[in-house]
Amino acid sequence: MTDTPARAIVLGGYGLIGSACMRALAAEGYAVTGVGRSEWAARRVVPEADWVIRDIGRVEAAEWRDILAGADVVVNASGAFQESGRDDLTGIHVTAVQRIVAALEGTNTRLVHISSAGVAPDAPAAFFTTKAAGDAAIMASPLDWVILRPTLVIGPAAYGATGLLRAAAAMPWIAIDVLPDAFIQSVHIGDVAHAVVQAARGDIAAGTLAHVTEAEGRSIRETIDALRRWLGFAEPRLRVTLPRPLLSVVSFAADLLGRLGWRSPLRSTAIRGLEADVHGDPAVWRAAGGRDCRSLTETLASMPATVQERWFARLYLLLPVSIGILSLFWVLSGVLGLVRFEAAAAVLTGRGVGNWIAGLAVAGGAAVDIALGLAILWRPWARHACLAMVGVSLAYLLAGTALAPDLWADPLGPLLKILPGIGLALTAHVLAGDR
């Protein structure tokens, strides 16, 4: 007869921290269940795990009691960085935490809550203030809890700020310094996951609130330089500091894109967080029995960069460029077709196509072009829009070949130029993949 393994439930289980926690807990012998809102992401990131697919910010306390029933440990690794078309900070960081606390009252379940360095009620951004409110709800409860506040988390996978830092380190010939003197401490994702395992095992006393971080820190400029050396890229020949007013314009634009579902690491929350510095004191964690965390140098040494890291770093900034070019190209194509309707129709009528068919083709094509150019800007539709662009482009090629084959020999190459557009749409489709 074998002992039943302890049960762990990880909220936000397919995120950067959550997925690492799920694997670490499973390796420790726990029966692990993940909770997240996207079944597609869950099955891709940790396919071997059991999953409960729910929108964490919308689950009521009564349903949480059912989901969390029988759990020995609950790890809350869920979170969102800024308000967007997909994310409600209060719902995820405050309301959900309050409901989870209510659902766990009267149980012996340990709650391990992943917060963040920089959390405070008077912090400069809603991410930090809502996280602080969630932390306060846990600390005011009678639960068996441990709260961990990691600094900048670095691991083999890169999202958000860590992806942006890698992209900045990969820029050829030039280094663009954004808040170059802001202070950063980091922590290896494996050290965060190990901290969660220690807390889950009961090695860390209940009521512990601790930063999980390396002891030393450095400026953003020094951090990017370290990543550049890690990636194996040459030192920049020119350094340019991005002026603060221009940075404000960039973050404002990133906030607008956030409303369309694009979670850019240049949003105002990230900038304000960096301005306030990303730092923590590991003394409490050490005193509680926690293992020392690796320095940035040790972190990078533990995960040697290969061609895939260099590709990612170089391609990271090409996604917004690709989306912008595709949107502009398709919208302008449709608008020009309507503005120069007669000239566009003449391309077909001059080759024997009837007037009404030519007019219908131009009007319909223009409408489809504009719709696809706008659809790609809405994050949930972007990848589908890319595939639709490929399909419509192929349809244009087939129709052009059938109705106006002489255009293949046109010196301006109107049909030939469709081919690189197909390639760009396929590239954007791949790059826009989440998780």
Image: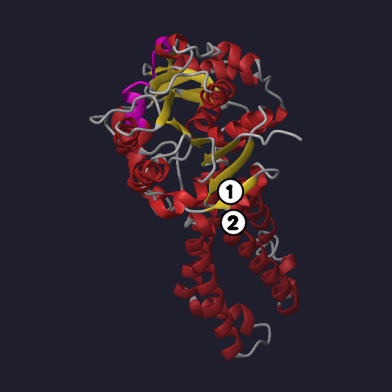
Hey, what amino acid is under mark 1? Ala
- Is residue 234 shown to the viewer in this render? no
| Label 2 CA crowd tier, 10 Å (few <14, some 14–19, many 20+) | many
Q: Residue shown at 49%/78% (left/top)?
A: 341
Q: Quarter of the image for the N terminus: give it.
A: top right
Label 1: element kind: loop
Q: Is residue 276 left or right of residue 109?
A: left
**Relative vertical location of residue 351 with respect to residue 203 in this rendering, above or below:** below
Question: Which residue is more in the foreground, 159 or 219?
Answer: 159
Asked whether the residues under the numbered discs 2 and 1 touch, taking CB atoms below 8 Å apart as contact, a structural biologist would say yes
* Figure quadrant of residue 231: top right
Q: Label 2, on which residue?
A: 383
Mark before the other along the chain sequence, 2 or 1: 2
114 lies left or right of 272: right
- Residue 285 % position (x, y): 44, 14
> Vertical placement of 24 versus 100: above or below?
above
Q: Which residues are magenta?
A: 271-283
Decide whether residue 278 is among the magenta residues. yes
